[in-house]
Amino acid sequence: MIDERLVPDGVLDDLPPILRRVLAGRGVATAAELDLGTSGLLPPSGLRGLEAAVERLVRAVREGERILFVGDFDADGATASALGVSLLQAMGAADVRFIVPNRFEFGYGLTPEIVALALREEPALIVTVDNGISSIEGAACAREAGLDLIVTDHHLPGKELPDALAIVNPNQVGCEFGSKNLAGVGVIWYLLAATRRRLAEQNWFAHRPQPNPADWLDLVALGTVADVVPLDFNNRVLVEQGLKRMRAGRLRPGLRALARVAGRVPERLTAQDLGFALGPRLNAAGRLEDMAIGIRCLLAETDAAAMQLATALNELNRARREIEQEMTAEAERAVVAIDIDPAERHGLCVYQPGWHQGVVGIVAGRVRERFNRPVIAFADVGGSAPDELKGSARSIPGLHVRDALADIAARVPGLILRFGGHAMAAGLTIRRRHFERFERAFESAVRARLEPGALAHRVLTDGSLDEADMTLDNAELLTGLGPWGQGFPEPVFHGRVEIVSSRVVGETHLKLVVRPLGGSAVFDAIKFRQAPLPGVSRVELVYHLSVNEWRDRRSLQLLVDELRPLDASVAVESV
């Protein structure tokens, strides 16, 4: 249960009890931590490499040089690219362009092939966003071609850094910036905010409008949430300020269009909408085709142009869901068919010929959710590398998956051709003929790093609720207290209930009416991707208090994460 002594006496006494309880469970101890105004943002001065990068960008703007952004093919990279192009243009940069690699042709990051593509644009300066920290060969090619290079990234660096004029990455050795959790879009926002300030000091805006970088926080919010970086205090400020601008109607046409095709009302957008509705539609372009369409959507200047592009993204997302469902079913069947019981495995590797490499990350996440194991899903690279597999890893708490891959690379040199990533997600490339050998190495690395008990199915919640606390008012209070996300999880509760009625909606979702055991009130609930439970009348739920909107009517709905018959063996704990 929650220990309210974590909150100093009197500090949060003005808040309703349910909010004090939730905040205490997330380490919030002072009222100042609830003030998510821009004044609470960390200053950019702690970012290593910032000064050199600002100096070069200022020169490029003042001299009208061609600046080329090289982005990544996910939502973080797309928002970072769009922010870089549009904010520099607003500062008066005469020639700003972007390219984004097609993941199926060029691979990840600033590869030599991408540098060759960039040279066709004849830039004076290349700026990477959300990539580049591991692009040793590509940086060398850029330098040999006489191009200046600024690397902005947030991924963990390796032992060797790229040869660049400047590197801005909060995770590089020697960087004193107070938050190591910035997304790629957050890094470029900080760099361009500092660039704007330097230009202002030089009277650059004496005869031209001076943009306010805060007007680009809608892009920062979307990229930060979609990249699932931890929402430390600084990131929560960035996301909350972006959401406030969206709700006030100060969002760019591309985001407005994405919200509409996703069935969301811009004035009521939440971090969950960014992560589960807008972000996936933007990501679909990079997963299935080319992220350029997503960036063009974000850069669209009219609602009509944005809606046309957002509609195309929505169709791509629909196709992505169909591919994902088929691949996930195949992956789960493959795991179950393994001679070794999944319960005896510490790490899982799955691969089927013909899988779509743009969707393997989602498949890895789905399989991880079912089996509570670190998972790597592989697909054929194809094209110029027909003997290679591209893998996407998703981890569980307690295993830093990138470090596990580093262990394998050190112990078995050459087994992994390339890798990189974070604690919870990583990417890698191996040769197809080495799949089984890698599978054994991954199992060994995971076993060595996981603490005993880490694989047990544990559900962490904020405790149970009395019927009196299960209200629409409390659901709206909790929604308004966000943003919630990685590292600052949305409040979740558990309780035992009787199923009064149930029916399948939308083909795969279970709509329920439930009554707490020993209680009298009934509540609507829904569990997505849940088959009916014939013969089951009493279950334990793990759920969120959510607001259901239908035909202008707002009502309480329990959004169910876990649904288990009472005799099922699952540990449900409070934090």
Image: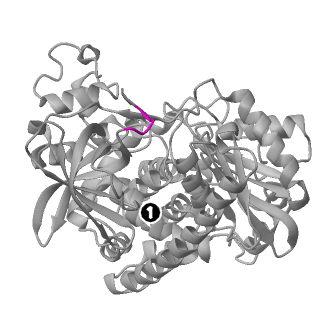
Residue 53 in view, yes or no: yes
Q: How many marks?
A: 1
Which element is circle 1 on?
helix
Residue 158 in view, yes or no: no
- 181 or 4: which is nearer to us? 4
Q: Is residue 570 magenta?
A: yes
Q: Is residue 28 magenta?
A: no
Amino acid under disc 1: Gly
* Quarter where residue 29 is shown: top left
- 250 or 274: which is nearer to us? 274
Q: Main secondary structure of the magenta part?
A: loop
Q: Residues within 10 Å of mark 1 (few under 14, many from 20)?
A: many
Name the outermost residue toward the front.
535
Q: Position of residue 350 (x, y in %)?
A: 71, 56
- The residue at the point 20 percent across, 63 percent down is 267
- 176 or 285: which is nearer to us? 285
Q: How is the image coloured?
A: one colour
Q: Position of residue 284 (x, y in %)?
A: 53, 71
User: Left of 430 or right of it: where is 536?
Assistant: left
Q: Tell me where the magenta segment starts and ends, as one range.
A: 567-571
281 shown above or below 416: below
* Quarter where residue 259 is shown: bottom left
Q: Position of residue 361 (x, y in %)?
A: 61, 58
Q: Position of residue 436 (x, y in %)?
A: 85, 51
Q: Quadrant of the N terminus?
A: top left
2 shown above or below 264: above
- The residue at the point 12 percent across, 50 percent down is 522
- 416 or 198: which is nearer to us? 416
383 shown above or below 24: below
Q: Which residue, given by chain and number where applicable, does mark 1 sit on?
A: 279
User: Left of 75 or right of it: where is 269?
Assistant: left
